[in-house]
């Protein structure tokens, strides 16, 4: 990890949890009771693909993918990257499976924040379904983000996420695992056709030089023969 991009501190993450539940409680049409933690082993939010090797100047696309969730009603997702290596080109949330078959959550959906900042090296999405929308269960993409590789180097793709369920007697956070990703940029390789062209140029050069040397040697031999 370098100092080029910020990391979430515990205080910021605690504040993020409060904001998410506040949004959820305001959007539900039913009273929200005591907040407790729901255990949901196997649920993940991941950068996919997790490992990326990209050429300098190349455009790459990553997904923020949710897997094996039950009763999901709200999401709070932050992705951070190294701004000296990656430049964000676009960030598209995939909310509402009625319009995004690969997405998550059911309509109606209230989007509180959906913003990508290259200056901060951060994408932040906060959204919740609105009752009487059904809770979401299953897997899908939360967002799709496209970057341009601007410099050689390494960038972590760090996720900080919160998931909340729907329960008239008390909404709760959904236990899950965040899986980060990486991007390593490399110098572009010469395509095969370029290598072949360089090989032909080199061979031609060698042949031309060889013919000149042969002619020069032949002339020198003829002159020596005449003098003898």
Image: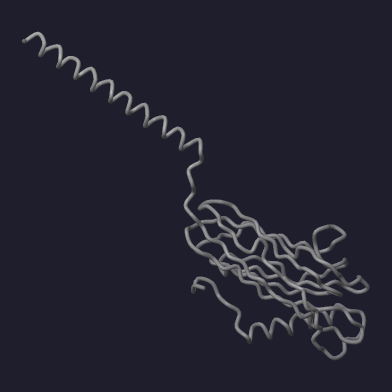
Q: Residue furthest bottom?
A: 34
Q: Position of residue 139 (x, y in %)?
A: 80, 66
- Rendered position, 91 above or below 130: above
Q: Quadrant of residue 156?
A: bottom right
Q: Residue furthest left?
A: 228
Q: Position of residue 165 (x, y in %)?
A: 84, 78
Of the pair 35 and 209, the residue shown nearer to us? 209
Of the pair 223 and 185, the residue shown nearer to us? 223
Q: Position of residue 102 (x, y in %)?
A: 80, 59
Q: Residue at x 57, y 77 (%)?
A: 7
Q: Residue at x 77, y 61 (%)?
A: 94
Q: Residue at x 61, y 55 (%)?
A: 60
Q: Quadrant of residue 211?
A: top left
Judged left or right of residue 203, residue 84 is right
Q: How many marks?
A: 0
Q: Residue at x 62, y 66 (%)?
A: 181
Q: Quadrant of the C terminus?
A: top left
**Render colour scheme:** one colour
- Rendered position, 138 above or below 29: above
- Rendered position, 45 above or below 53: below
Q: Position of residue 80 (x, y in %)?
A: 60, 70
């Amino acid at each position: 990890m370098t100092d080029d991009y910020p990391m979430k501190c515990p205080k910021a993450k605690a504040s993020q949890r409060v904001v998410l539940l506040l949004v959820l409680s305001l959007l539900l049409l039913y009273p929200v009771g005591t907040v407790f933690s729901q255990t949901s082993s196997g649920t993940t939010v991941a950068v996919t693909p997790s490992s990326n090797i990209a050429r300098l100047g190349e455009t790459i696309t990553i997904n923020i993918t949710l897997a094996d969730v039950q009763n999901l009603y709200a999401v709070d997702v932050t992705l951070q990257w190294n701004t000296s290596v990656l430049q964000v080109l676009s960030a598209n949330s995939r909310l509402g499976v009625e319009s995004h078959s690969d997405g998550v959550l059911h309509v109606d959906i209230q989007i509180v924040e959906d913003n990508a900042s290259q200056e901060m090296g951060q994408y932040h999405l906060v959204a919740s379904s609105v009752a009487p929308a059904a809770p979401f269960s299953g897997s899908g993409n939360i967002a799709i983000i496209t970057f341009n590789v601007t410099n050689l180097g390494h960038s972590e793709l760090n996720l900080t996420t919160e998931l909340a369920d729907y329960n008239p007697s008390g909404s709760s956070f959904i236990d899950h695992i965040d899986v980060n990703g990486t991007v390593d940029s490399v110098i572009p390789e010469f395509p095969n056709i370029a290598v072949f062209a360089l090989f032909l140029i080199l061979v031609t050069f060698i042949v031309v030089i060889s013919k000149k040397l042969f002619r020069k040697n032949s002339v020198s031999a003829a002159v020596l023969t005449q003098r003898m």
